[in-house]
Image (cartoon, rainbow, N blue to C red):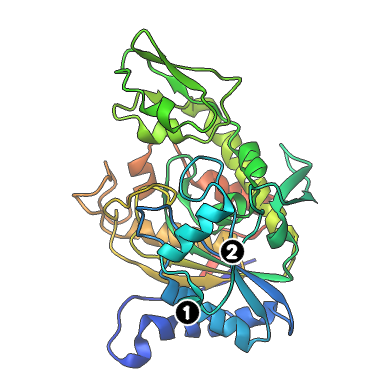
Amino acid sequence: MTSDVFIASMRARSAEESTVNKIRMLFERADLSNVIKKGDLTAIKVHFGERGCDAFISPVHVRQVVDKVKNAGGKPFITDSNTLYSGSRHDSVDHLENAIEHGFDYAVVRAPLIIADGLKGKNVRWVKIAGKHFEKVRIAADIAEADSMMVLTHFKGHEMAGFGGAIKNLAMGCASAYGKMDQHSVRPKVVTGKCIGCGKCAEICPVGAPSIEGGKCTIVREKCIGCGECITVCPVQAVGLDWSSEIRPFMEKMVEYAHGAALTKQGKVGYMNFVTRVSPVCDCYSWSDHPIVPDVGILASKDPVALDRACYDLVNKQPGFKDSQLKKGHEPGGDKFLGLRPKVDPRLQLDYAEELGMGTNDYKLIEL
């Protein structure tokens, strides 16, 4: 079975073809209003971006979806869940302050902001699933209890998932802090010969797992929660993962959480991916690196697997930027995500999501 995926390019030659109008047209063409009933409390799942990041979806663009949800009779609220790692979104106070600093205040988006897993990430609902790794998953309560949901995702690279699309937004973004820990149950290792003993890993770790002994880093596995912050800050890439054994289980756990989040409202979720400023790393970083390809457009669907697959294919069709983090695959048709991380195959998440019945890799791309 093939799923419809709708796309609007970033070209505009008149006011009618502005980005804000295209978002509204995409919402209509993809029939996303059909997932909303009058009076629905509708979660609009976004990523507010870590402080210092600026590649997240513009709040002006989010506002267009808010308006369409209201027109459909829904009562929208904009939401995300707290992070596992330390940063500007670790608790709801910091998270909301960060969101407002990034432009997500009521005057712009015209909807309230709610951090879905509570003040300290402990407000959760268990959702039963049938996966390889989990029988039940911990979903942020206010997302689980919403009547319907719109998942708005900035499509980009990701160090452990290959890319971050709608599936990852459902998985990590809808999970409580403990749910994120379930998914991140991978443990970094230190290449001692590379380590320079700078201590940045120890400074950033929220649980004190790394320490510097004899000028080298040691990570206590029993303390580690697998958030991966030490990997991101190591200046010499001395901290990493066992890519041969850790990545597949991580992706499968991530997909199972995405499945659980979607199961809380079967048939009542719409998806929109913004394939713009396709950065090499997640918006959880406190910076935004040079994009790896030119902007592709904005895509919408009711099928998250087909949507992510279409975005993956379209990014790969682009010429890669030579001055980006992309190491290979610059030619049109080259796999950009394998070009960033040769040991991380993002198709694993797509295939497992299809196996779980979340959607299909087969899609029909329909241009506005």
Of residue 203 and residue 341, the one placed in the foreground of this image is: 203
Q: Residue 56 in the image: state x and y as whole percent.
A: 41, 61
Asked if residue 32 is positioned above or below residue 168 in the image, the reply reads below
Of residue 35 and residue 72, the one placed in the foreground of this image is: 72
Q: Name the residue at the top extreme.
A: 214
Dividing the picture into quarters, in which one does residue 233 lie?
top left
The residue under the point 33% across, 49% down is 287
Asked if residue 77 is positioned above or below residue 344 in the image, the reply reads below
SS at badge 1: helix
Q: Which amino acid, mark 2? A: Thr
Asked whether residue 24 appears in the rendered view, the answer is yes
Identify the residue under disc 1.
107
> Of the numbered discs in the image, which one, if any, rests on residue 79?
2
> Of the numbered discs in the image, which one, if any, rests on residue 77?
none
SS at badge 2: strand
The residue under the point 54% across, 66% down is 363
Q: Residue 333 in the image: state x and y as whole percent.
A: 33, 55
